[in-house]
Structures are given as structure tokens and as C-alpha cells.
Amino acid sequence: MSELLKQILSSTIITTLITSVIVYLFHKRTERQQALIKREFEKLSQKDTAHFEWRKNTVELLGQVYIHLNRTSLGFKNKYSRLKEYDPYYENEIMYHSNKHIRDVLLNNGHYLPPELLDEANKLIEHFDIWLSKYNQIRSVENNEQVKQIYVGPNGFRFPENAEKVFKDKYIEMFNSLHL
């Protein structure tokens, strides 16, 4: 009987040892898989967070452009183009500041623009560069008795109306996708 007990005991020890090794190997494999899943999840989470932040900043940028485009558009249609005599305050406060703001915000935050807006942004920047350049050139002449409103359309730099439409449409689209 003692021999039988030794065989049972030794086989139990071997079985326990083998089972422990198998459990240990499965545990290590599970830990590696969990670590891999965790890294992948964190990578996806960071990518999603970065994309959300980019979209949020893009909507903020487009919102500023939208408001200033409306401001100059309404100002141009309602008063600026209908002025009988030059109003420097109106031109400085409405046209100059909004034109400059749109140009500056596009130049300083162009990395937030979706690729499909880059060509239109360049058209706006070009128009505002020419307008601001002409504005500064005309205003730099001291005691200019023939002070006049600034128009660059007749010089071949018409306002890019399609760019305005594309920017406004993209703002509404992105705002709705971000907030709805």
C-alpha cells in the first residue's frame, strides 16, 4: 500500500505542478493581451480626443470668420456701398477691423482649417491683403483731400463670394455635428 500511496502522491504533485505551470502561462498571456488592449484603447482614445479638440478649435475659428463675414457683408450692403460721402469712422470700425480680423485669424489658425477650405481661405486672405494694403496706402497720405472708400474689386480683386458661402456652410455643418 505504501507504494501505491507514493505513486498517487507523486502523480498528484506532478499534476499540480503541471497545472500550476499551465495556469501561470495562461495568466502571463492574459496579462500581455490585457496590456496590449489597454495600449490600443489609450491610443484610440488619444486620437479621438485630439480629433475632437481639432474640430472644436475649427468650429471656433469658422465661427469668428462667419461673424465677421456677416458683419462686413451687412455693413457693405446696408451702408458702406451707399455712403454719399466718406465716413472714416464707419470704414475703420467695421470694414477695416473685420477685414483685418478675418485675415489674421485665417493666417494664425490655418492649421485648424479642413483641407477643403484651404483654397477658399487663400482667396479670402488675398482679397483682404490687397484691401488692407490699399487702405494703408491711401490712409498713409497725410491731408489727403480726396479721401475715398476703399474698393479693390475694380482692380481685379473682387470679393470671393463663393469662399464666403463655403466657409459659412462649413461652419454650420461642423457646429451641428459637434453640438447635436
Image (cartoon, grey):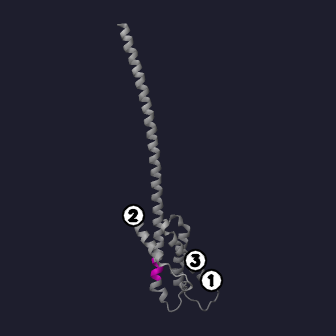
What's the amino acid at mark 3? Asp
User: Residue 177 shows which numbered tag?
Assistant: 2
Contact (CB < 8 A) between labels 1 and 2? no
Image point (47%, 59%), residue name? 53
Question: Of helix, strand and loop, which one carries label 1?
Answer: helix
What's the amino acid at mark 2? Ser
Residue 137 at what x, y percent from top left? 62, 83
- Label 2 Cα crowd, 10 Å radius (few <14 / some 14-19 / many 20+): few
Q: Quadrant of residue 59 in the image?
A: bottom left
Question: Of helix, strand and loop, which one carries label 3?
Answer: helix
Residue 101 visible at all: no
| Chain part drawn in magenta | 70-75
The quadrant of the picture occupied by the N terminus is: top left
Q: Nearer the viewer, mark 3 or mark 1?
A: 3
Q: Label 3: which residue? A: 129
Reply above or below: 145 against 163.
below
Image point (54%, 79%), residue name? 96
For the residue pair 58 and 120, the one nearer the viewer reads as: 120
What's the amino acid at mark 1? Gln
The quadrant of the picture occupied by the C terminus is: bottom left
Q: Label 1: which residue? A: 137
On whether residue 74 falls in the magenta region, the answer is yes
Image point (38%, 66%), residue name? 176
User: Residue 117 shows which numbered tag?
Assistant: none
- In the rendered image, the residue lying farthest to the right is 142
Image point (44%, 35%), residue name? 29
